[in-house]
Image: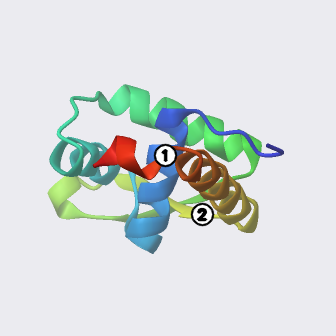
Amino acid sequence: MKYALGEFEEIVLLLVAAQHDQSYGLSITKAIEEKLKRSVTMSSVHTALYRLEEKGFVQSNIGGSSTARGGRRKRLFTISALGKTALKESRAARNQLWSMIPEFLMK
C-alpha cells in the first residue's frame, strides 16, 4: 500500500471524514467511545490527528471562540485529498483480504 494507515489512524481519519467540518479532538474521542465502545484518551486522539496532519491526510484550522469553552478556540480538522486516497486504498486492501475468506467460514 502506498498510503499505509495504522488501525487507530484509520479510525480517526474515518471519523474526520464522517464529521466533515465539525471534527475536533473531543468529538472524535466521544465518537470512538460511543460507536466503537472503545475507551480512548483525548491525548491519543490528538497524537493521531497531528500525525495524520504531518502525513498530509488532514488539514486543520482554528475555529471561533465560544463562551461554552471559556473563550477558547478549538482546532477543527478536515480530510484532505491525500487522506481520501489513503482511506480508499485502505478500504480496497481490506475488501481484497475479506474476499479471500471462504464464505462458509463466515456463516
Toward the viewer: 54 or 35?
35
Q: Is residue 1 left or right of residue 93?
A: right
Q: Position of residue 1 (x, y in %)?
A: 79, 43
Disc 2 crowd, CA 10 A, few/some/many (<14, 14-19, 20+): many
Which residue occupies the extreme bottom position in the image? 21
Q: Position of residue 50 (x, y in %)?
A: 59, 38
**What is the three-letter code of the residue carrying label 1?**
Pro
Relative to residue 12, is residue 64 depicted above or below?
below
Front of the two marks 2 and 1? 1
Looking at the rendered structure, the secondary structure element under dot 2 is: strand
Res. 25 visible in picture: no
Q: Which residue is mark 1?
A: 102
Q: Quadrant of residue 19?
A: bottom left
The residue sitting at 59% across, 46% down in the picture is: 100
Q: Which residue is mark 2?
A: 79
Q: Quadrant of residue 52?
A: top right
Which residue occupies the extreme right position in the image? 2
Toward the viewer: 7 or 68?
7
Can you tell which mark lies on residue 14?
none
**What is the three-letter code of the residue carrying label 2?**
Ile
The residue sitting at 72% across, 39% down in the picture is: 4
Res. 101 visible in picture: yes
> Do the residues bearing badges 2 and 1 touch, measured as CB atoms within 8 Å?
no
Disc 1 crowd, CA 10 A, few/some/many (<14, 14-19, 20+): few
Q: Quadrant of residue 54?
A: top right
Determine the CA span between mark 2 and mark 1. 35 Å
Q: Position of residue 86 (x, y in %)?
A: 70, 54
The residue sitting at 27% across, 49% down in the picture is: 107
Labels 2 and 1: the sequence-earlier one: 2
Q: Is residue 71 left or right of residue 19?
A: left
Looking at the rendered structure, the secondary structure element under dot 1 is: loop
Relative to residue 32, is residue 83 depicted above or below?
below
